[in-house]
Image (tube, helix red, strand yellow):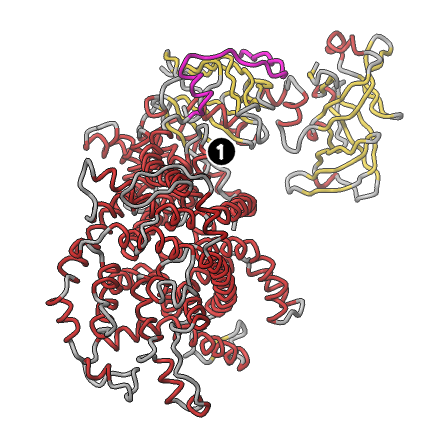
Amino acid sequence: MVSVPNVDRAAVAPPPGPFRSRMKKRLGPDIDGYGFLLPATIVMVSLVVYPFCLAVWFSVSDAFVGEPASYVGLENFIYILTEDDIFIETIWNTLLFAFWSVLFKVVLGLSCALLLQRILKLRRFFRGSVLLPFVAPTALSTLGWWLILDPTYSHINWILANVWPFSYFGWGPYNFLGNPTLAMASVIFVNIWRGIPFFIITILAGLMAIPDHLYDAAEIDGASTWRKFYSITLPLLRPVLAIIILFSTIFTLGEFNIIYVLTRGGPMNSTHLFSTYSFTYGILNHEIALGAAVALFLFPILVVIVVFLLRMVRRDTSHEL
Amino acid sequence: MSSDTTTLTGSTGREVGVNKVPIWRRRKAAANYIALLPYVFFALFPFYIMGITSIKTDEEINNLGQSPFWATGIATEHYVYLANNTSFFNHWFVNTLIVTVAVTIISVSIGTLAAYALARLRFRGVEVFGVAVFITYLIPQTLLFIPLIDVINTIDEVVPIRDTYWSLILTYPTFLIPFVTWLLMGYFKTIPVEVEECAYLDGCSRLGALIRVVLPMAIPGIMCAILFSITLSWNELLYSLVFIQNETAKTISVGVITELIRGDIYYWGSLMAACFIGALPIIMIYGFFMDYFTSGLTAGAIK
Amino acid sequence: MAEIQLRDLWKYYDDVAAVRGINLDIEHNEFIALVGPSGCGKTTTLRMIAGLEDITAGDISVGDRIVNEVAPKDRDIAMVFQNYALYPHMSVFQNMSFGLKLRKTAKEEIERRVNLAAEILNIEELLERRPKQLSGGQRQRVAMGRAIVRDPQVFLFDEPLSNLDAKLRVQMRTEIKKIHQRVKTTVVYVTHDQVEAMTLADRIVVMNEGVIEQVGSPEEMYDAPETLFVAAFIGSPSMNFIPCRVEANNGGLSVRLSDDLTFPVPGDRNDRYGSCVGKEMLFGIRPEHITDKRPHTDPTHHDFTSDVIVLEPMGIDTMVFINIGETEITTRSRPRAVSQVGETMDFTIDMAHMHLIDPETEKVL
């Protein structure tokens, strides 16, 4: 029986191998990975990266539909920031819209998820119903809201006028989409309606991930329902909440469908967001350069959120949700 | 414990009465259901309004004194109108269907390949690709629709795609591929590597192992990716609004918004009928495959 | 013929060396166990033989062929994984026949081989089931069946029993041994459980920190460990190590374990240990060689007395923990002869089984 002599444990660098091995050493063992990524890369480069660069170019040019564009520096940005009052209003609108929408979506989504988690019967029915706004085509379901908010046909006004106790106060009728404040409230309202399911689903998943024995322990310690929520649920849910709030913020900032269908930015430009204002410039007024400049204002916000998100996603993988 | 047994027999042979669920526990449970009702009502409200309005006669809709929440009869006139006087079924529905199917096939296949590489293979830059996918997933359409017009015009000089659903088949994958990739990446990571390695030892090539072993094991994930692609393509508005002006080339969402809303007099009946029918296929798919939807959204957002 | 040769085999993960230039010859139809603590490089070595990991440097040959660049699918190797890695979407029959189907084996031949393997493993009635419907032990059998069916040149096992409960593990261990006797082929078996390695293998390879510590038969490993690591790793409960000083007296040698405990070294080892006189060494002795006091005539047996600190009854024997100097050691006695905790007890030590280890080089002298 041959026993093999021990090799010196000091790591001696091995000699270089043949060409393929050296390639593998430089690029990793699974070189074919690049092939798998090729189709996706082609699509993303030609239809996302290239258009994005084009958008940047447009924003520093005087591009107008049907005319050759030339470089104008930061003129477009200076114009919309200094001379375009509507754009300044759009910034405020967007912040207002995103803030109230996300706030209500968190509160309502969390409360609904907590309730859904507790019921045992008719689970599918309840879940299915509250998640429906998320899957239905936004443009079409928003048209439903359009009818509900219509000055003449409004179901809400009808209730205010004909159903006790509301009829007693004599409120309304309101022109929900005709008054700047009410219009903003309306689009926020519909956005909340459409966005809650996303919160419900993700929070439900987060709730499932909290081990039952924590609640058992708390119960034995004599914790009340409220105390359990405050001391166990909320702290353990915080990473999930943070991530979905950021996700939702991105989607809410980029919202187009609801505004376009309900108000098209009106009345008196009081509900314009970056998306609809960019659409107005770029598509309706053919001012491609200004349209691109408006849309690009989303980008810095996006970058900040993405950086936050990436950090959180990376950190979270350690204690698997 | 089943409710119809009222006694159980203990180890000593003595019968023991089964305790009732304590009343406070039952009250608490009932309160949960009652508290959920407003959410359900809120979520379903516009769909109910769409449905009920679409089966009223115009006369009934315009009778403002009557409760708008109920219909006295079922009128099919608005659906008939949609079928006979608009391009709803002939073109918009068909176009939406074609675009949805094509885009889903393209996005899911390309996304699957990419997700597999990112989840499983080890090569330089894999992290960077992963982050890039994540970022493109989050880039809103708002940022891209203006330059994409230019890209489509450029391509149109070689292949005529402008003002046809081909322009949508080309552009929808830009938001679907990152989503599918992100979703499936998380899913592939849950499949044990050893099974795949075993396939290699059994004689599979990389692609062979992917098709014969990994994909069959990832069917729930793939299903979810397919369902999401279908939903998001079916529901898309901005690109189709911007890229298509030709009435017969429109999709449902755009067609309804641009063609069925004319002037100041709204034809609520036919409009609501169109909304209802347009949303129905997605709602039905959702009804059948709800569990895939929820699991996918969770994976896509959290993983 | 399928002997395996590893020549100066290296594996780096980025800058970390997992395997450091090991050499090993595995003979045709030999059952080799790679054993060592986690992170010692045993699994990496196995995966390199399978082709699942690239080789950083060195050569692996299977049969007469160098397989460094050969894809796993072309190596004609079968592997049983720790988590069985059954294809969940296929029936047991499909699981077992998958490899043959890919190799375009005739249908009758596939059926013949699958049925034969099923018969060997006693899983004939499970062929139509899905992996989900099987118990842990049954899955284990199917995983082995899948490998047997292929009739490969080499069988690789990666900790195949560690997911089973204790009782089943012992049963399957016997099973694997029987199967190897029936289906003769070269086996490389990775485990962290030295008992498994001892009971199954023709030869054991003990690895530590990416190098091979020792290769040899189970008996050699047990009786004649070459390094401190192997001495400590093989055997359960493990060998006792006591700091000692080697002393010379009237032509013989003795080891001083504590101020009042000295035992003479067996005379045939005088030459071996001669150079250690006066040095601080490690004295190694297995628990079973310190027993309750028994009548003896052997000159290597010596008696001593010590206080009992802890008792661990194991049924057939009782582990008695005592202190020698500063060191707590384990001894093995018949339950009847054991004193109570705190009382003194008489012991007999068999110096014929002693080991002397140089603490500097960690080599057994």
Relative to the observer, which residue lies in front, C216 or A48?
Answer: A48
The image quadrant that residue A69 belongs to is: top left
Query: Image height check: is A37 above or below C51?
Result: below
Relative to the observer, which residue lies in front, A291 or C80?
Answer: A291
- The residue tagged with tag 1: helix, strand or loop? loop
Residue B137 in percent (x, y) is at 41, 46
Residue A6 lies within the magenta run: yes
Residue sitting at x 89%, y 25%: C259
Residue A220 lies left or right of residue A185; in this view the side is right
Relative to the observer, which residue lies in front, B105 or B61?
Answer: B61
Residue B82 in percent (x, y) is at 15, 68
The image quadrant that residue B136 belongs to is: top left
Subunit bearing disc 1: C
Q: Residue furthest front?
A: A83
- Dominant SS in magenta: loop
Residue sitting at x 35%, y 28%: B201
Residue sitting at x 35%, y 67%: A262
Query: Image height check: is A160 above or below A42?
Result: below
Q: Is residue B15 visible?
A: no
The region drawn magenta spans: A1-29
Residue C192 in percent (x, y) is at 55, 31
Residue C326 lies within the magenta run: no
Identity, as a three-letter code, of the amino acid under mark 1? Glu
Residue named by callout 1:
C159
